[in-house]
Amino acid sequence: MPRAGLGPEMVAAAAADLADEIGLANVTMAQVAERLGVRTPSLYKHVGGQSDLTRRIGVIALNELADNLRDELQGRAQRDALAAAATTFRTFVTEHPGRYAATVRLDTNGPGDPLVAAGARVVDSLSAVLAGYGTPDCDAIHALRTMRSLLHGFAVLEAAGGFQMDTDVNDSFTWLVGFLHHGLQAASGEHPRLP
């Protein structure tokens, strides 16, 4: 007999929690089924297999990150907004490394894909930070990629235990935010464009 209330959302939520506990690469359909107290074949009534499950975890993660960014950026501009976005990004990745891993490289299925909408929400929040700096349109994509690369790289390395030197990681993070702040100011049009 099917478990009452079991559906794609419940399956994906259980898989996302499991990914945070054991790592995305270690999540299997069998483990998710065990977590939910059902047999593995039952899951295929709700998700299309491992890759569909990973995509669904990615959508959950992007929407959660977007919600957190939206909430933390309210009423903030320039360095305050940048620091809030950076801290929110860092906190999400270190607290949810498994589900965040599902966001890194997923191909979309076109404009109606929930993954596109969820990713756009994150980009919109990060773009709002850049707008506060007056980043010229011609540099917006470069600035967005730079910001995302710095935040992603720092958070993923930290979540993986990649910072082994004695220097305080929080001091390094503060330095990163300051570095990015000054770079965005320099690229805002008040100074010559970066090459």
Image (cartoon, helix red, strand yellow):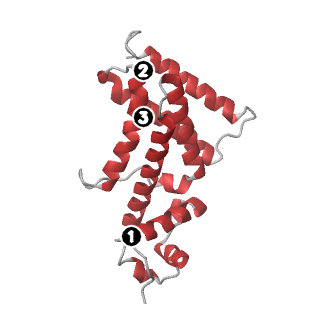
- Label 3 SS: helix
Residue with the most extreme bottom position? 1
Residue with the most extreme right position? 166
Cα separation between marks 1 and 2: 41 Å
When asked about the image quadrant of residue 60, the answer is bottom left
- Label 1 SS: helix
Q: Quadrant of the N terminus?
A: bottom left
- Label 2 SS: helix
Residue at image coords 39%, 9%: 192
In contact (CB < 8 Å): disc 1 and disc 2: no
Q: Residues within 10 Å of mark 1 (few under 14, many from 20)?
A: some
Cα separation between marks 1 and 3: 29 Å
Residue 126 numbered mark, or none: 3
Q: Residues within 10 Å of mark 3 (few under 14, many from 20)?
A: many
In contact (CB < 8 Å): disc 2 and disc 3: no
Residue 133 numbered mark, or none: 2
**Percent coordinates x, y for residue 22 in the rendering:** 59, 63
Residue 8 numbered mark, or none: 1
**Percent coordinates x, y for residue 135 in the rendering:** 37, 21
**Percent coordinates x, y for residue 7 in the rendering:** 39, 73
The amino acid type found where label 3 is placed reads Leu
Residue with the most extreme top position? 191
**Percent coordinates x, y for residue 11 in the rendering:** 45, 70
Q: Can you say whether 43 is above or below 146 in the image?
A: below
